[in-house]
Image (cartoon, rainbow, N blue to C red):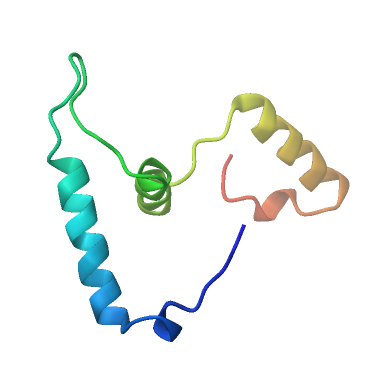
């Protein structure tokens, strides 16, 4: 992993415009048969994050059971945001 200060290389607005152009080009390629869209790295995760923040995160039943058990053990069962 590497972290760079984009502003040290070019103005942020220019970088944003270049990224928008690159993404538009990526999205404009012909689709493979059976596919509806091309995704850039991190796009699916960003969409899922936005959906989860809007609609909530759906946890598996066994995870909810474990959280209930833990909440009872530490005396916080009445503060759970789910039944």
Residue 67 position within the rendered picture, expressed as x and y whole percent measured from the top left? 72, 40
Nearest the viewer among 79 and 20 is: 20
The reply to whether residue 17 is visible in this rendering is yes
| Rendered image quadrant of residue 35 | top left
Residue 43 position within the rendered picture, expressed as x and y whole percent measured from the top left? 35, 46
Is 45 rendered above or below residue 10? Answer: above
Nearest the viewer among 72 and 22 is: 22
Q: Residue at x 26, y 62 (%)?
A: 19
Judged from this view, the residue extending furthest toward the right is 73
Residue 10 position within the rendered picture, expressed as x and y whole percent measured from the top left? 34, 82
Nearest the viewer among 48 and 68 is: 48
Using residue 54 as the reference point, say whether residue 56 is left or right of it: right
Q: Residue at x 69, y 52 (%)?
A: 78
Nearest the viewer among 53 and 15 is: 15
Judged from this view, the residue extending furthest toward the top is 34
Using residue 83 as the reference point, say whether residue 50 is left or right of it: left
Judged from this view, the residue extending furthest toward the front is 9
Q: How many marks?
A: 0
The reply to whether residue 55 is visible in this rendering is no
Residue 26 position within the rendered picture, expressed as x and y whole percent measured from the top left? 21, 44
Q: Residue at x 40, y 81 (%)?
A: 9
Is 4 rendered above or below residue 41? Answer: below
Using residue 69 as the reference point, say whether residue 6 is left or right of it: left
For the N terminus, the image quarter is bottom right
For the C terminus, the image quarter is top right
């Amino acid at each position: 992993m590497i972290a760079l200060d984009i502003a040290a290389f070019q103005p942020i607005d220019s970088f944003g415009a270049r990224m928008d152009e690159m993404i538009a080009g990526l999205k404009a390629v012909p689709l493979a048969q059976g596919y509806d869209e091309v995704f850039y790295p991190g796009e699916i995760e960003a969409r899922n994050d936005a959906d989860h923040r809007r609609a909530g995160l759906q946890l598996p039943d066994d995870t909810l059971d474990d959280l209930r058990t833990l909440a009872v053990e530490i005396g916080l069962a009445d503060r759970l945001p789910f039944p």
